[in-house]
Image (spheres, coloured by chain):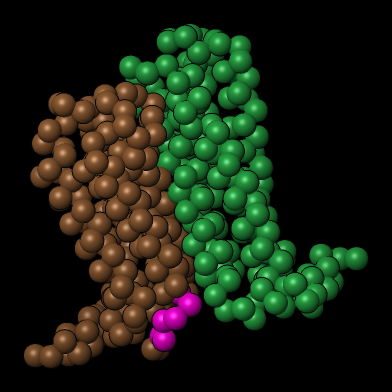
Chain colours: A brown, B green
Amino acid sequence: MSIETTLQQIYDLPLSSLIRENVNAFPVIESLHVLAVALVFGTILIVDLRLLGLAAHRPGVRRLIAELLPFTWAAFALAVVTGSLMFMSNALAYAANTEFRLKLVALALAGLNMAWFHSTAYRRIDRWDEVLPPPATARTAGLLSLLTWITVIFLGRWIGFTLEVVF
Amino acid sequence: MSIATFGDWLYATPVSTAIRETTWIIPNVQAIHILAIAIVIGSALATELRFAGVFATDRQPTDMLRRYLPWMRRALLVLLLTGLILLVAEPGRTLGNAVFWTKMALVAGASLVTLQARKALLRDAVTVEGGPALEASRPLAWLMVLIWCAIIFCGRFIAYT
């Protein structure tokens, strides 16, 4: 089974055609997607800037991450659900779109960066929890996170201008 | 001059045409607009949920305001500037649009409450934990979170109405 067949099957799903054919479905889903993305970036930015050495509303990084992460994850879940629904409605077009593909790469990089941070600097957080500026690994992770998420948002908006939709 | 004629006039101006015809301007300005609203919603969420008494309750509300209010002010300025560019480029999409004017009313209200009322609270230093002013502002704090979310939703929805 080729990837095209799978994408065509996704396109043919009843839910996909429902999103395509209902005039309000896509606008509502996309608006929720932007809201979710804004919440993801807005909450992650507070942590990233603290990792770069800009004081947040509390001195300890560990607790800052712990109290903000639930909001980031909840918003990210909403972004994934709404994003998947938009993808389903035009699976072949999205899969062929360069900006969409690059956005997935940027998201993967953001994930890898997070994994790298948690397995390095975060393990030794007791030593730098309230220290300013934070160690170089933490600063690097903060900067990379900031850059990848900004890239994700730019690419995401560009999809809307480059997607060749099929009806 | 009616709003529609003003929109037509604006659309025909060289600056409006130039923004539209330079294909990379609108997507990038929209992306910057989203980055700026993300700064506002992140700051607003932290600050308002502190006011609501459900977030960072070990910190003083004034700490939150001091940290996040300057960011919100700057991000709101970026939103105003990028929003103006988008409005000049495509006046027909916004000026006659009920969702756009709903968003503008919500933005005006939310900005006013954020920049003025909360600043007054900061100045009067009545924000001591459990103080009556803080208790009374809890429903307003929840309302503000909802309003900022509605603003972002409306912002994208404008494109479809």
Q: Quadrant of the N terminus of chain A?
A: bottom left
Q: Quadrant of the C terminus of chain A?
A: bottom left
> In this view of the protein, which residue sits in the foreground, B56 or B150?
B56
A164 within the magenta span:
yes
The residue under the point 21% across, 28% down is A128
Per the rendered image, the range of residues in magenta is: A160-165
In terms of image quadrants, where is residue A57? top left
The residue under the point 48% across, 32% down is B68
A43 within the magenta span:
no
Residue A155 makes an appearance in the image: yes
Q: Residue furthest front?
A: A136
**Place of residue B85 in the rendered image (x, y in percent of width and height, measured from the top left):** 66, 63
Is residue A86 positioned above or below B36 on the image?
Answer: below
**Place of residue A27 in the rendered image (x, y in percent of width and height, measured from the top left):** 46, 67
In terms of image quadrants, where is residue A68? top left
The residue under the point 27% across, 69% down is A104
**Place of residue B2 in the rendered image (x, y in percent of width and height, measured from the top left):** 86, 65
In terms of image quadrants, where is residue B17? bottom right
Q: Is residue B150 left or right of residue A17?
A: right
Q: Is residue A38 left or right of residue A15?
A: right
Is residue A38 positioned above or below A152 on the image?
Answer: above
**Place of residue B24 in the rendered image (x, y in percent of width and height, measured from the top left):** 54, 75
Q: Is residue B4 left or right of residue A87?
A: right
